[in-house]
Image (cartoon, rainbow, N blue to C red):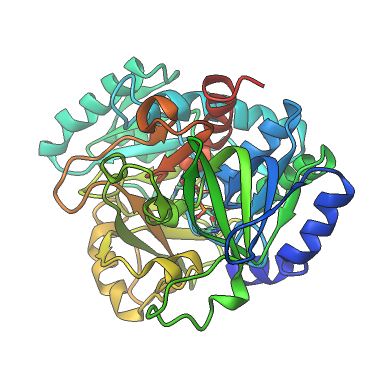
Amino acid sequence: MLKSKIQSLERISSSLSVVFKILKSRNIATTTGSSSSNGVPKEKVDCVVIGAGVVGLAVARELTLKGREVLVLESASTFGTGISSRNSEVIHAGIYYPPNSLKAILCVRGRELLYKYCSEHNIPHNQIGKLIVATGSSEIPKLHNLMNNGIKNGVGGLVMMEGSDATRMEPELRCLKALLSPVSGIVDTHSLMLSLLGEAENHGTTFSYNTTVIGGHIEENRLSLHISETKHLENWNGKFPLQPEMVLIPKLVVNSAGLSAPVLAKRFDGLRSAVIPPAYYARGCYFTLSNTTICPFKHLIYPLPEDGGIGVHVTLDLNGQVKFGPNVEWIDGIDDVSSFLNKFDYSVCTNRAKLFYPLIRKYYPNLKDGSLDPGYAGIRPKLSGPRQSPVDFVIQGEDIHGITGLVNLFGIESPGLTSSMGVAEHIATRFFRC
Ligand SMILES: Cc1cc2nc3c(=O)[nH]c(=O)nc-3n(C[C@H](O)[C@H](O)[C@H](O)COP(=O)(O)OP(=O)(O)OC[C@H]3O[C@@H](n4cnc5c(N)ncnc54)[C@H](O)[C@@H]3O)c2cc1C
């Protein structure tokens, strides 16, 4: 399904040269009349959003609606081929995150905005609710802690249930206790992104696909972006420095390059390296349930969180497909340009299923042998490594790094999909009073 979605999106394809014609015709780009010493053209623009994932799209829409001229630069041939099309598609309640953290605040606010947006724009979604389950007695205090945390974060409707009551709701479920979160749900991320994109475009946002930001430099305390057509990077062997084909001088830049955001920021010459957090990557694989026509669950079912993730859970998509995942597999970073081109390893090895069965059977003992098929994988953009405490979203403006008009988004892992519209609102109101 993921593949067909991506293929269906690939009809949308533009490149730097085409986009510049558009920019000129709309007077968005103003030729500075200058070129750098090596003859590279320079153009002034209003706002640039780097990356057309769900967060970049939400930010572009928000800034456009606030009257800014927005240009979105995306290295892939279409939108949403990165983390945003490789996740659980769950609308999170906001239970897990430390009170007053950006994750807590933006998840709760983003959820409200997202449900409203989905209802108003006919985006397929369903508030099916979620059960977080304790299957061993040592987990019960942790479940109570989660409930208290969720209440502090302003999550409404949480109910602690006995295992027997949970089994009455979900006959295939076995647990000692369960925390019901009625505000959790699922969303069709592809439809959401398509809608955000359409609205942004209708209000004047220009999208430049196949266009990679390869770095930048600071001039008069503003960031100039170095741009290249993606096709010119595909054979890059890392042995020679990259030369931009164009330099853009925006008033505002939002670095929402997902997995690549920290490595890209390191290529902004003049940005203090001390403000760029270390990047870690954790793959999460999904298996789908086969050999059954009947969906065993009506709710999302989650175990307690684990190191690096929130546990191998049951997710349902809007077509009724049951998915189990994601696990946590720490991976080494790849080189910068490969990360810009999304050359991560997304393969799901059939053998990994044997690790999934015992985890899932803790709460779904009737899972039959041979019923898990490899699904897909996504990669989390993390700011903490194995056995380290989770780190909050990092949304950096001038107050942190000192560069006028630059906002870096680092570590936008889960609940980034849920939070996307909250992140966009936060950026527009806090950093760019339009
Ligand atoms: C396994 C997994 C499960 C998840 N489950 C959930 C969930 O259930 N609910 C939830 O709320 N969140 C979930 N998340 C988190 C959520 O998916 C992400 O937070 C969100 O999709 C991030 O969106 P983004 O726009 O920041 O990144 P992306 O979607 O990756 O977008 C970044 C874009 O930048 C482009 N790019 C990269 N480098 C450059 C460059 N140099 N120049 C130009 N373009 C560039 C990329 O091609 C990409 O399109 C999950 C994440 C993972 C990995």
- Residue depicted at 24% across the width and 40% down the height: 390
- Residue depicted at 59% across the width and 45% down the height: 56
- Residue depicted at 43% across the width and 57% down the height: 260
Taking 9 as reference, is 415 above or below it? above
- Please state the horizontal and vertical placement of residue 206, each as a whole percent of the image: 76, 49
In-image side of 190 versus 329 (left or right): right
- Please state the horizontal and vertical placement of residue 180, each as a whole percent of the image: 39, 30
In terms of depth relative to the viewer, which is nearer, 174 or 125? Answer: 125
Q: How many marks?
A: 0
Taking 433 as reference, is 28 above or below it? below
Q: In which quadrant will I find the C terminus?
A: top right
In terms of depth relative to the viewer, which is nearer, 397 or 110? Answer: 397
The image quadrant of residue 274 is top left
In terms of depth relative to the viewer, which is nearer, 81 or 231? Answer: 231
Q: Say if residue 14 shows up in the picture.
A: no
In-image side of 158 versus 74 (left or right): left
In terms of depth relative to the viewer, which is nearer, 179 or 346? Answer: 346
Taking 186 as reference, is 283 above or below it? below
Q: In which quadrant will I find the N terminus?
A: bottom right
* Residue lying furthest front: 37
In-image side of 124 versus 174 (left or right): right
In-image side of 423 versus 309 (left or right): right
* Residue lying furthest right: 25
- Please state the horizontal and vertical placement of residue 210, each as a whole percent of the image: 65, 67
Q: Say if residue 167 shows up in the picture.
A: yes
- Residue depicted at 84% across the width and 43% down the height: 27
- Please state the horizontal and vertical placement of residue 273, each as a whole percent of the image: 29, 46
